[in-house]
Structures are given as structure tokens and as C-alpha cells.
Image (cartoon, rainbow, N blue to C red):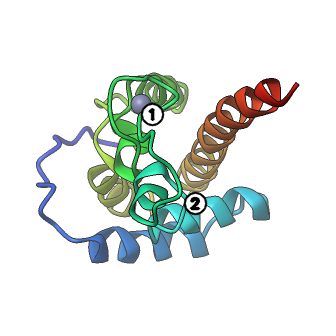
């Protein structure tokens, strides 16, 4: 797999992400719960703090993983310094030597370089689903663990 620069702009719509997502979700051999969270991420349907704030459900929109920026799908995957470190290590483990990009660039890179039924491509798609799922779980654990401790 070749390296690619991060040259997509953030102005490209979510349609790109959703189109990419279909290819990465439908051809993914990961377990269902990982694929489901990946599907929600591609369609911006995860209940991230920016969406909850828009509905008036929360006031605090800071990312619980890094604490330095607002939480949204693009930030969680993989603009966040915490998740970027994880994804970078996964890429190295996969022997993919490129810098971590934002969500749109990562997914478009994946569709270009990790399509088909070659074992490396399938392992990449599983690793992407696993990483997204476990980052989302870590985010939930940090939020809800604090709330449970506050209730005690
Ligand atoms: Zn963050």
C-alpha cells in the first residue's frame, strides 16, 4: 500500500464519507457491533456532544479523550490527539506508513487502497471498524464512569 498525502479539504460533504462508508462497511468481516458503530460514524449518527448540544441535551462539548477541542465525529476519528495516536499505531501494525488524516481523508484513502478481497485489505477494514468501535467505547466509558461516580 502506498502512502498518500492528506489533500482533501474539509469542505467536501458528508456524501463522500457516506459513499466511502458503504464500501468499507458492506465488505467488512468484523463483528456486527464494530460494523454498526462504523456505519453510524460514516453517517454522522453517533450521539456526539456537538449533536447533543444542538438538541439542548448537554452544555459541555469538550472531547473527553483529549480535553482540548469540541467533540464531533471528525474530531473523534482521527483529529483527536488520543485517537490519532491509536490509529497511527494500528497503521504501523498494518505496515502502512502514512500520517493519520482526518475522517474524510482516511476513508477516501481506505476506499482507494483497501478495496477488494485481498487479505491485507480485509484486515485493514476490520482494523478500522475495531479502532472506531473501541475509541467510541473509551469515550463512553470516560463519560459514564464519571456520571456513575457522581451519583455515589
Ligand atoms: Zn479529542
**Where does the C terminus fall, quadrant-wise?**
top right
Quadrant of the rendered image holding ligand 1: top left
The residue at the point 53 percent across, 30 percent down is 90
Q: Mark 2 points at which residue?
A: 38
Q: In this view, does 99 lie to the left or right of 141?
A: left
The residue at the point 21 percent across, 42 percent down is 4
The residue at the point 51 percent across, 66 percent down is 24
Q: Is residue 31 visible?
A: yes
| Residue most extreme to the right | 152
Q: Give the image location of residue 128, x and y in percent.
A: 55, 48
**Where does the N terminus fall, quadrant-wise?**
top left
Please tell me in which quadrant of the rendered image residue 127 appears: top right
Q: Of the residues under marks 2 and 1, which one precedes in the sequence?
A: 2
Q: In this view, does 82 lie to the left or right of 112?
A: right
Q: Do the residues labelled 2 and 1 touch (CB within 8 Å)?
A: no
Q: Provide the secondary structure element on which disc 2 rests.
A: helix
Q: Give the image location of residue 112, x and y in percent.
A: 32, 61
Q: Give the image location of residue 10, x and y in percent.
A: 16, 55
15 or 51, nearer to the observer: 51
The residue at the point 16 percent across, 40 percent down is 5
Q: Mark 1 points at which residue?
A: 63
Q: Does the residue labelled 1 lie within 8 Å of ligand 1?
A: yes
Amino acid at each position: 500500500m502506498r502512502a498518500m498525502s492528506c489533500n482533501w479539504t474539509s469542505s467536501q460533504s458528508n456524501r463522500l464519507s457516506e459513499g466511502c462508508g458503504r464500501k468499507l462497511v458492506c465488505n467488512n468481516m468484523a463483528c456486527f457491533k464494530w460494523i454498526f458503530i462504523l456505519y453510524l460514524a460514516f453517517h454522522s449518527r453517533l450521539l456526539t456532544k456537538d449533536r447533543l448540544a444542538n438538541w439542548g441535551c448537554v452544555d459541555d462539548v469538550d472531547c473527553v479523550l483529549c480535553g482540548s477541542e469540541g467533540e464531533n465525529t471528525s474530531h473523534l476519528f482521527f483529529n483527536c490527539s488520543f485517537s490519532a495516536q491509536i490509529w497511527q499505531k494500528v497503521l504501523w501494525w498494518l505496515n502502512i506508513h502514512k500520517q493519520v488524516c482526518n475522517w474524510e481523508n482516511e476513508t477516501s484513502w481506505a476506499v482507494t487502497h483497501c478495496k477488494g478481497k485481498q487479505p491485507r485489505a480485509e484486515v485493514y477494514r476490520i482494523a478500522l471498524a475495531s479502532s472506531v468501535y473501541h475509541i467510541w467505547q473509551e469515550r463512553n466509558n470516560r463519560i459514564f464512569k464519571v456520571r456513575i461516580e457522581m451519583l455515589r
